[in-house]
Image: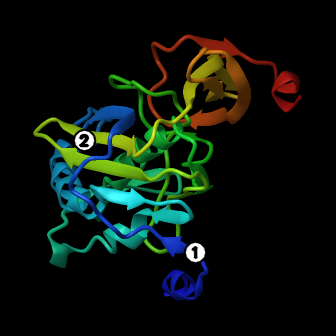
Amino acid sequence: MVRSLNNLCSAKHFAKTKQKKKLSYVVYRHNSLIRRKLGNVDMRLQENKAVNLSIASPRITNILIRPGETFSFWYLVGNTTAKKGYKEGLTIFADHTEPGIGGGMCQMTNLIHWMVLHSDLKITEHHHHDGLDLFPDFQRKIPFGTGTSIMYNYLDYRFENTTHRTYQLIVYTTPEYLCGELRTDTPQNNKYHIWTKNVFFSRENGVVYRNGEVYRDKMDGCTGKIIGRKLIRRNHARVLYDTSGLDIAETDVTEAIN
């Protein structure tokens, strides 16, 4: 309720206009596998997630984000209720997973966030599943730590178009993948590259952590020269799954503190 009232009173101009015709220039494309083996999670929840994503995608796809406008995931998608056809999917609460109606929306915002990281758009609201590594990697394509955490009317994913060009977000599902495209009406001069450094597992006081740094390079689109570099995430996440088989560095307690 508070979030809805804030939206009504806000000076922000939320993106809400759609256009079926695709804008001319592709900024970034990405496909994300829908059904994943996540430890011992019931695959029924993965099947239901596929349904949930197929319902939410049309609420987002073809949206135009014009100069000065803000994209809000929940503003467009709304509450994911059973009445709308959403099923019980996987949700993350505190330090554990549990079934919940509309579960799986994080995969949608993960996809959108990954594409936005490759653009000149300004991220204005972004939440993480802080400090936790919940599942072992399964066909991972993007760096750990570049995901999102959302909860209807509490935790949103938002970005603002502070450029002079119009962007268009396209998302849709196939039987296997959640697919996305970010487009513009004029070429984006800058290119972006996301990469990791110092990635390793450590054991501290008997607890295993996943560590690493995620960087974002900004490059001149014509020359490829790096014109900016930013550390966007430093991971130190407690591993919550079976760690047997992992290469784990034994860390001294004093090292961990320092």
For the question of whether residue 214 can be seen, the reply is no
For the C terminus, the image quarter is top right
Circle number at residue 12? 1
In the rendered image, residue 112, in percent from the top left (x then y), is placed at 41, 46
Question: Looking at the picture, which amino acid does disc 1 mark?
Answer: Lys
Q: Which label sits on residue 178?
A: 2
Q: Residues within 10 Å of mark 1 (few under 14, many from 20)?
A: few
Q: As displayed, is residue 135 above or below residue 94?
A: above
Q: Residue at x 75, y 18 (%)?
A: 251
Image x and y of residue 171, in percent: 27, 48
| Label 1 element class | loop
Residue at 32% over, 46% down: 23
User: Depth check: 244 or 188 in front?
Assistant: 188
Mark 1 or mark 2: whose residue is earlier in sequence: 1
Observer able to see residue 193: yes
Residue 204, above or below 56: above
Query: Residue at the spot x=26%, y=32% of the render?
Result: 37
- The vertical placement of 47 against 200, above or below, is below
Q: Residue at x 39, y 24 (%)?
A: 141
Residue type, mark 2 in image: Leu
